Amino acid sequence: MFVCRFHGTVPGSLCTNVRINSGRARQFGCDAVLCPLGFYSDAGYASAGSGCKSCPDGESTMYLGSSKCRKFTQRDFLSMFFDVMGGESWPVERKRGWLEHSLSECHWAGISCDEDGIVNGLDFPINGVQLSDDFLMR
């Protein structure tokens, strides 16, 4: 089975295309193509009288067109951060402990946590980027 994961938004030209999903774009707009983040349906898009449903409180989706919602942990978000920021190419000292299942994320390089194990800081230097004092004060 081929699985494709979508991020971002559905192009507007698809949302008005009446040839997609048996013309359901007239009724559901972009949802006829893929359910947005935080919404789901069994098919992953609005179909035959059934639109995309909002995820329950405390749950969300990771991709457009999801067929189910789930709870995400701080480890999930940090793991996504690592992937998106190219963590595999970080210097060894910066990626120490990252994604190791036997370690709490509180022991990953650059992560700080409170006494309850909740992440409260991320020390992540951005090479080549200068931040103004004005930006830092926001």
Image: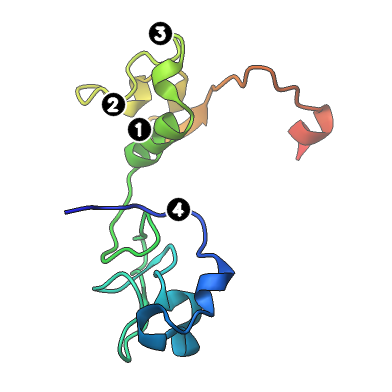
Q: Earlier in the sequence, mark 3 or mark 1?
A: 3
Figure quadrant of residue 138: top right
> Closer to the observer: label 2 or label 3?
3
Which residue appears at 40% of the width and 32% of the height?
83
Q: CA distance from mark 1 to mark 4?
A: 30 Å
The numbered mark at residue 7 is 4
Find residue 94 and report its horizontal and vertical position in percent.
45, 13
Q: Earlier in the sequence, mark 1 or mark 4?
A: 4
Q: Earlier in the sequence, mark 4 or mark 3?
A: 4
Residue at image mark 3: 92
Q: Earlier in the sequence, mark 1 or mark 2?
A: 2
> Closer to the observer: label 3 or label 1?
3
The numbered mark at residue 117 is 1
Q: Secondary structure at mark 4?
A: loop
Q: Is residue 35 left or right of residue 68?
A: right
Which residue appears at 39% of the width and 40% of the height?
77
Q: Earlier in the sequence, mark 2 or mark 3?
A: 3
